[in-house]
Amino acid sequence: MTKRLRVAAGQGFWGDWPEAPYRQVTGGPVDYLMMDYLAEVTMSIMQKQKSRDPALGYAKDFIPLMQRILPILAERKIKVTANAGGVNPRACAAAVAEAARQLGLQKKLKIGIVSGDDLLDRLNGLLARGHTLANLDTGRSLRDVRDRVLSANAYLGAWPIVDALRQGADIVITGRVTDTGLTLAPMIHAFGWRADDWDLMAAGTVAGHIIECGAQASGGNRLADWQRVPDLANVGYPIVDAQADGSFEIVKHPRTGGRIDVAGVTEQLVYEMGNPREYITPDCVADFTTLELRQAGKDRVQVSGVKGKPATDKLKVSIAYFYGYKAVGTLVYAWPDALKKAEAADRILRQRLKDLKLTFEAIHTEFVGVDATHGRLAREDFASDDVPEVQLRIGVRAREEAPVDRFTREIAPLILNGPPSVTGFAGGRPKPEEIVAYWPALIDKQVVKPMVEVVEV
């Protein structure tokens, strides 16, 4: 059994820094590279891609990144866990295998594929058998929007990844597994943890939560003393340096920028935390109030004392469905009286939309540079004459496309027939966009059957 394990974060979201994976596997010793790609809206985007081309539906960015580092992974025996497979993990695995063959790595790598999370084709049967997939916020049955559903994926946990690793996989590509499971699984596999040792499951879950957003735990997007974070251009992504007893440290490679300290790790811990006593995953329920953080050295935070409770009998299901249409347009107004001009343009545009008798579900205006971030609170003690420029940003939402399309044609005329000194018409006339809405639900674990296969390159 392994006594110590280093799991490095290589991506925190689909679109993260392309240099991070390479820097993580070349900057110092690591055993695993964890790469997290998926968010709720991501799945619907990938599902639409797959509907247009059965060979798509995964994070295509993953392939060139892997192509760059595959020889290093093979040489240094570094394993990868990644949910880049989206709604088509087999196609993603096939693309990685082809890249490996082009690099002459035949018979040197095994790829694990985790699927079974995609419930889209099973929804009618599940509803017929009494699984209402009720919205966790509203209580409504999914039947209310069934005809508009675009994607439906259950959050699998760490154990299917563990299964793939036990079968010898060097790279494990998954669909929708939990972000934390990508880190917890290597720890379970390396340390031989039992599924019902809830404190250890919770410790691995906390470790995964800390590094799941990449550099957000090592100095990026940081509130505390952000101006004193050194060399963000060279930021080092976080690494879990773990021991078999469940204690671990968050570190980064030497000679990299950023900072790892208690304040920054604490900020990441509260990200998407919800109830701190019940951080629920498929693998356990972690109690964030029990853990202890200690600065153990420069860019080294020790985490210990994590307590956990038994996992629930449910899995969360992330469902995306078509809701309607939206469009957002912008105009920039210059000093003097920049805010007054933008406010006047907003009134004029709203009056014209009203005169056209267009029906919108919502019309929302922001004055960027004034109140777009903090809303009406930003107007208190605000000296509008001091604003050198203001961006009027106005958006509309409707169930039908026609009123939204007409709205897009009412923005540009304001340049000549509205208030003066428009300095830019950013991006030209806006276009109507489809709205993808989120439907969170729960389902019994017993009806979701993860599937694991391991193929040799």
Image: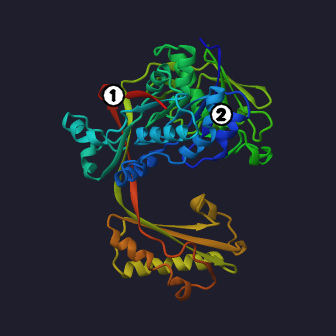
Q: Is residue 294 visible?
A: yes
Q: Is residue 375 above or below residue 335?
A: above
Q: Is residue 435 above or below residue 439?
A: below
Q: Is residue 395 left or right of residue 209?
A: left
Amino acid of disc 2: Ile
**What x and y, as percent, mark residue 7?**
62, 28
Structural distance between the alpha carbons of marks 2 and 1: 34 Å
Q: Is residue 276 visible?
A: no
**What x and y, as percent, mark residue 321?**
34, 51
Amino acid of disc 1: Lys
Q: Residue furthest bottom?
A: 417
The quarter of the picture where the N terminus appears is: top right
| Residue wearing tag 2 | 72
Q: Residue furthest left?
A: 128
Q: Is residue 440 above or below residue 253?
A: below
**What x and y, as percent, mark residue 83?**
49, 37
**Residue drawn at (53%, 75%), measured in percent from left and top?**
428
Most foreground residue, 275 or 121:
121
Query: In what element is the residue under mark 1?
Result: loop
Viewer-side label of 2, 1? 2
Mark number, residue 206:
none
Q: Is residue 205 left or right of residue 20?
A: left
Q: Is residue 441 left or right of residue 21?
A: left
Most foreground residue, 32 or 93:
93
Query: In what element is the residue under mark 2?
Result: helix
**What x and y, as percent, mark residue 5?**
64, 21
Q: Is residue 169 left or right of residue 29?
A: left
Q: Residues within 10 Å of mark 2 (few under 14, many from 20)?
A: some
| Residue wearing tag 1 | 449
Mark 2 touching mark 1, by CB under 8 A? no
**Residue drawn at (62%, 28%), measured in percent from left and top?**
78
Quarter of the rendering containing residue 22: top right
